Image (cartoon, grey):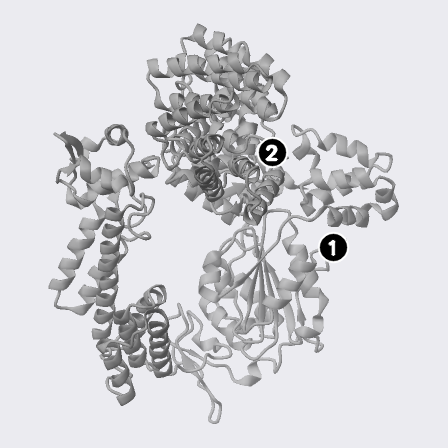
Amino acid sequence: MEFRLLGTVCVDTLTGPLPLGPAKRRSLLAALLLHANTPVSMARLTDCLWDEEPPLHARTVIQGHVSRLRALLVGADAQAYGVELATLGDAYVLRVPETLLDSQRFEELLMLAREQRDPADTVLMLKEGLSLWQGPALTGAFASAPLQAAAHALEESRLSTVEQLARAYGELGEHHRAAAVLRAEAVAHPLRESLAAALMTALHRSGRQSEALDCFHRTRRLLADELGIDPGRELADAYARILRGEGGPGGPVASGRTAAAGPPLPCAPSADTRPGAAPGGPQPSAGTATTQAVLPGVAGTVQAVPPAHVSPSPYTAGGVPADLLPRAPRGFHGRGAELTALSRAAAGEAPVCLVTGPAGVGKTALALHWARRSPAAFPDGRLFADLRGFGETAEPTPLEVLREFLLALGVAPRRVPESAAGAAALFRSLTDRLSLLVVLDNARDSAQVRPLLPGGADCVTLVTSRHRLDGLIASDAAVPVPVDILEPTDGTALLAGVLGEERVLAEPVAARRLAELCGGLPLALRVTAARLAGRPQWTLAAMAGELADERSRLSYLDVEDTGVSAALRLTVQQLPPDAVHHLGRLGHHPGSHFDPYTAAALAGSDPVTAGAALERLAAAHLVTEAGPGRWILHDLVRLYARGLDPAAAPDALVGVLDHYIATALAAADTAEPGGEPCFVLPDGFHAPAATRDFTDRAEAMNWLATEREDLTLAAAAARSAGLDDRAWRIILLQWPHVVWRVRDGWTPMLELALAAAVAREDPYAESRVRNLLGWVLTEEGRTGEAVATLEPSPGLARQAGDRLGEATALINLAIVQAEQGGLDVATEGCERALELAREEPDAHTEMLALQHLARMQLTAGRPQDALDSARTAFDLGPEHEEAARRVLLLSVSGEARLALGAEQEGIRLLDQAAAEAERAGYDEGAVRALEALLRVTASPDHVRRHTEATRRLTADTP
């Protein structure tokens, strides 16, 4: 267990960070950790959680957050680490060993660094301390004055440490490193003169005087423009020293770092120097130039062969440039962007072009098509080797490949070295001044490629692989050219190339459907075309009908020993067992996207393990990263993966459904921290190993919005599998997003939830779903359907003993009754709901009842009563996270003030409501507040804002 303040405020455990929830709870934790092992008073905590006047129930809120934090720590076995959150009178103390707190470890490392005599040891200590920082201090906490001051103090300590690290590098003579660590901070803090002075000195001592002077003048201008002051003494002194040339380039140099130019590599080794040759063999005659060099991996020296032993140019007998390329691919279509990218990548110096993509996507066809396009570009020849990194047969050894290359370049068979290292050295030497293309197809990893790279600056190496080969990018500056699936137009063109244009043009719709069912994968398209070519009596529509069945699609995409399944099998067999296990479980994912948490839930692992597996699968192009932390499976890969572990489907589905329930609960708790949990967990709930933690409301709402489609697909899968108890829960937990975007077409999803609740014969679930569905129908203007949906809800809630659910049902029914003109009965319903909420008691439901009661009182011509109800709701204290409720209460208060004749105060409140709604992205609330404003003022600003908010709302509505 580790507590972090140097970055996002969090508690790390073996299974991931604890789900701390809203910003206020993080602020509480931060305040306690900043005074670890010391009592922190309630007054101090209140100052840390609220900037302005705290609400009347601040103590209750703090007690609630303490209770939840204590429960989280207990659940993470905090006692085993010596951690305890205790109550001491009117204060709380978080007892935690200092070794578990990153800010304490940081200070300890700084103290140790000051005690070191060797600057190299100082560097190690300071670098370790700075590595503890994962972002700005106290990220995710509420920006109250005390916490901002603490964050500033921590940041000041970090900057001071960076400057100390630079000084230590300077003592070692490593001024370029000092400049590197200082530059990033100087850019981020351009007015900090000590940073600028240190950077100038480091640049000057690195021999970069012009950059040092430029840094001074840039800082001087900034100080004058921003603060109206001249550079201070430290900065001015550094400038003067540079002008005088003091402490110029140089500094301590470590011993043993001198370098000398090495001898050139030989053209070919002498027969007498091969392994096993007897010593004392023939020596070169007088006048014959020889070169001696140690070849990697070969003991002793090898002697160069006189030029007469090698052909004067890399030509085979007959004077034709070496050409080992296979025949040009037939039926090649599209790939204009990739061909252009290859040409650009090949224009560099000694380029290594890396063509990567999934099995069957056409990497080899692309490479060969490009290689065949311009033979004149490689006057000295084109070499090709299939490295068989993903084949059933054994891979060729590097020596076997190099021997073939050397023979093609004119080396006599007896002159080819017998060691891979010797052959590689000779190949590099021979190609040093050539313009040559080397195509290395189906590489398994970077190590397989490196010995085969030519030595000349004018040589181009083209590597294809199903893996990303990040190592080759790092070591040899390889330029990746990723190859994706074909667009439908190119896919149909490929079909036409095999079947003939007439047959494809006769069924254009079916041809496009075939391209879609093959997932744009050229291999799948070619197999499909081959099957159709052998069956001229078949229509394309008939073939599309067969492929539409997911259960048999892969079998139809195989012919003899070629096909999608075979290609994928060869890729998968290269993976470690853990990656294969995760891939098999991903095949049972009901949604379209997944992250490490989802993958872990499907596989029964943890997010760290799942994340590593996803990286492995992505490197093999079996999954694709669609965005940061979001992955997708190609349809055909999904079908193949599903067949890897078909018996795991039920467990995988339950695991991912319960993951969604746990994550949606955390999101709802963060987005609406005062809201009541909608339900108990389902029977047999499988708690995930770790649940995503949301730092604030925006992050939680973004997750609900991003995952909406997959949550709907998951609920539908649960319904199909008879897991109705999961289906309605997954849907109902999206209520914060439903409220935020009420007109976004939620009805079909909620009707699915209602069907699930009815199937379970669960009055609690049915009442809760009817409440939300009825309210959405009301907002959509479908009042008749809303009434029919809501009328059974209060009775169902009473039957279930759900008093708060009954209160919510009465409120929602009252809203639609008021819409239909039954204002009196609606008001009575809201008043009854208010009584139920106070009997529980539940402040969130009480505020909800007061909010709608105020609206009804205003409609009934009772503005003073409406204002009183709104004030009572405000006294209960909507938090900053509850933006929608604040906006609606401010709006009704503003309208009530207008009705009472206090026009200026009413306009102020409505303008405040609109501004808060706009800041929070609550367009529905902004439109309502601005509409009320436009009834009393024609301000151009209000008209513009109303138009913009309406446009946003309309754009977001399906």
Question: Residue 201 occupies which quadrant of the picture?
Answer: bottom left
Q: Is residue 626 above or below residue 686?
A: below
Which residue has dot 2 on it?
Answer: 639
Q: Is residue 385 left or right of residue 655?
A: right
Q: What amino acid does circle 2 point to?
A: Leu
Q: Nearer the viewer, residue 747 or 262?
A: 747
SS state under label 1: loop
SS state under label 2: helix
Q: Residues within 10 Å of mark 1 (few under 14, many from 20)?
A: some
x then y, percent, for residue 909: 44, 38
x then y, percent, for residue 906: 46, 37
Which residue has dot 1 on it?
Answer: 332
x then y, percent, for residue 366: 67, 57
Q: Residues within 10 Å of mark 2 (few under 14, many from 20)?
A: many
Which mark identifies residue 12? none
Q: Is residue 779 left or right of residue 160?
A: right
Quote the CA–CA distance across marks 2 and 1.
Answer: 26 Å
Question: Residue 329 occupies which quadrant of the picture?
Answer: bottom right
Q: Is residue 235 above or below residue 756?
A: below
Q: Residue furthest bottom?
A: 287
Q: Residue at x 15, y 30 (%)?
A: 87
Q: Nearer the viewer, residue 331 or 884?
A: 884
Q: Nearer the viewer, residue 90 or 65?
A: 90
Q: Is residue 333 above or below residue 352?
A: above
Q: What amino acid does circle 1 point to?
A: Phe
Q: Is residue 342 left or right of residue 887?
A: right
In the rendered image, the quadrant that contains the N terminus is top left
Mark closer to the chain start, 2 or 1: 1
